[in-house]
Amino acid sequence: MTEKIQRRCEFCPNLSFVNGGDGFFYCNGCGSQANDIIDMSVDNDDGCNVDGGIYRTSQCRPKRHQISLTYTDYYSEIRLRYVMGLQAMIQMQCKTLVEKFNVTPLIVGLAGPIWLRLLAHENVLSDEWAYNVINESESQTQGEGELPQPTGSQKTEPHNSLGKRAVTIWHKSLSSMIPLPCSLAISFLVCHVAREAILPTDILKWTLEGKLPYFAAFLEIEKQLGPPSRSCPISTIRMFRPIRTVTLQKLESLAASIATKIGLELPSVNFHAITARYLKHLSLPVEKILPQACQVYEWSMPPELYLSDNDSRLPSRVCVMSILIVTMRILYDLNDGKWESIASCSNNLVSAVENGAGERGFSCNARGAVAEDDSASHDADPHDSTSDMSKSNSDAVELLKIIEEKYNELSDTYGNCKALLDFLIHVDIAQEFSKDLHSYLRYCKDVVFAGLGPAYDDHEEKKLIEDLWNFYQSRKAGKASEDGKTRHGCSSRPKENENFRDDSYKCICKTSRDDGDSNATLRQLKVDMKENRFVYIPPRKNVKKKDGYIRYARKKDGAYLYAVHADYYILLRSCAKVAQVDVRTMHVGVLTFEKRLEMLEKRIGFCLCKRIPDDSCEFCRD
């Protein structure tokens, strides 16, 4: 029978310790070893000896494991356990990416060489590693206060000359040279090398949702490696449980840093696959925009599409989205005035509703944008430039409507549960768990509080938890039945079609009453722009036929101010939301890419205009 004692743990609120079978007691909650309790393994029959054997040293039985641990035993076991545990975490992540997220199995073969080459570069497996770490810790005496005296089993552990535990020093050195986020960086790096359309946003999202083994991976690591031994007196949860998550920018730069250390030459991001993902997310026509975007990419080849170990550089996904924004502005002529024309379209719709008929030559499609009527398009001359211009304007208005609806959809979805959003650092987790308490509680149990149990075996506490859970389930079932009755029974609410027509008519009438700056939508847009330090530019008058592409600039007035048209801002903020970056950061990425395009055009023009000198050889002259 396993022997248990009741005492408070130093590292967690647990009150129960169990005999590990090696003469020491371990916490039931975190697995840490008790320093002031030891099992002498005395026979129960010794108390009945007439010579008082239990009180005489000669009659006491020896400890079960009389092992003298050496200096080498301690650092070898700590180093081996940390390296093997981190390797197991990488293997679990790659396996999950292949099985759950349909990533190519090639990443499993790529992860091994990258991991081994990183270990070789950091030189943690050398014989001098442990001694060098101890010597370095002894030289860092500045700011150190008086250390507590070691107690219990810590007395037998190795210490440096300052009295610090060598076990703690070695563990801190390993976690500093090869931190736990390296597992996520290697998982992202192998996906990048395998040309998969996996972004740092995906890795972080799946990690925070608990779908990618990271926060709760220590449970599986302990199953594979077993509990820590006496030569490694550090619990598994303390060694492999991350304290905080890694940022998106740090994840990308860490992956590039690992590639630089091991001498791995990286390709650029898979522009075609990532751009296709973004277009589908924005509900835009892939077959029309993607080929043009790929041509711009192949012609420019910006260096920002390669991973960089610089934390201050713009992420690679910002460059991908910048190329996409520039391509859409060129294709749909999104320079100014297109978004404001939506309000004028609404005025035409109001007059059509009041007169009982639509205006000749125009019709309203499902999204509320105005398009040319079929009869008008049939009568139009196919070679007429006016007809082409109307078609281009209609496509641009439709594009802006789709993008604006997508932005509102993302804002409504991501605006729920802001407190949970701040805690979990990602919007999709709030989206997933805001509607289902059961899945959120399961997430807390499996990820947030993984490995933690009751402080001690209390049957009353377990019974209370079961009663509360059953009460929640019964209330949930009752609410579902009431909602079903409301939906299928009689209701005083109007029909959905009538509601839709009334709301649409009210919206259109409101739009018709508001003109210019009094338009509610325009006022809301200006407020949104001001919050992000953007300045609204009204549509231009007397637009010339060959005005070309408009480039915006930023002005520093204490802080940077950005003056842009509404068309560009509507496109910019939606793309920034999908790429999960700030609007200003997205704008800086677009300005940087436009500057590169201008430089390329000037160089090409200079080279084409340059004449060959007359004193060149006959082959050059020919």
Image (cartoon, rainbow, N blue to C red):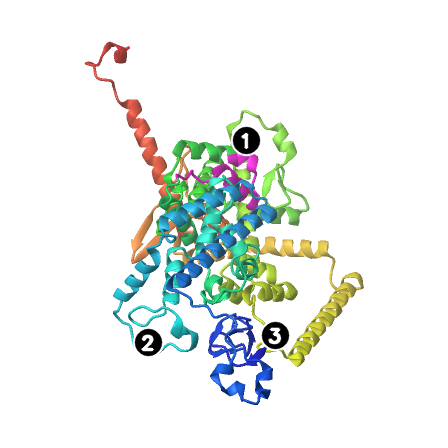
Mark carried by residue 147:
2
Query: Which residue is depicted at the point 68% across and 72% down?
Result: 469
Q: Quadrant of the C terminus?
A: top left
The residue mark sitting in front, 1 or 2, is 2
* Residue range highlighted in magenta: 265-290
**First-in-chain label (3 vs 2):** 3
- Residue 71: percent from left, percent from top: 37, 64
Q: Is residue 458 visible to the viewer in this orientation of the structure? A: yes
Characterize the local packing of mark 1: few (<14), some (14-19) or many (20 or more) Cα atoms within 10 angstroms: some
User: The residue under label 1 is which amino acid type?
Assistant: Ser
Residue at image mark 1: 387
In the figure, 161 relative to 594: above or below? below
Residue located beneath label 3 in the image:
2
10 Å crowding of disc 3: few (<14), some (14-19), many (20+): few
Question: Where does residue 598 sit, x and y in percent of width and height?
Answer: 34, 36
Which percent across, then down, holds residue 593? 38, 41
Answer whether residue 475 is magenta in the image.
Answer: no
Residue flagged by tag 3: what amino acid is it? Answer: Thr
Query: Is 275 included in the stretch rendered in magenta?
Result: yes
Q: Nearer the viewer, residue 489 or 273?
A: 273
Tell me where residue 195 appears, x and y as whole percent.
49, 39
Residue closest to the far right: 489
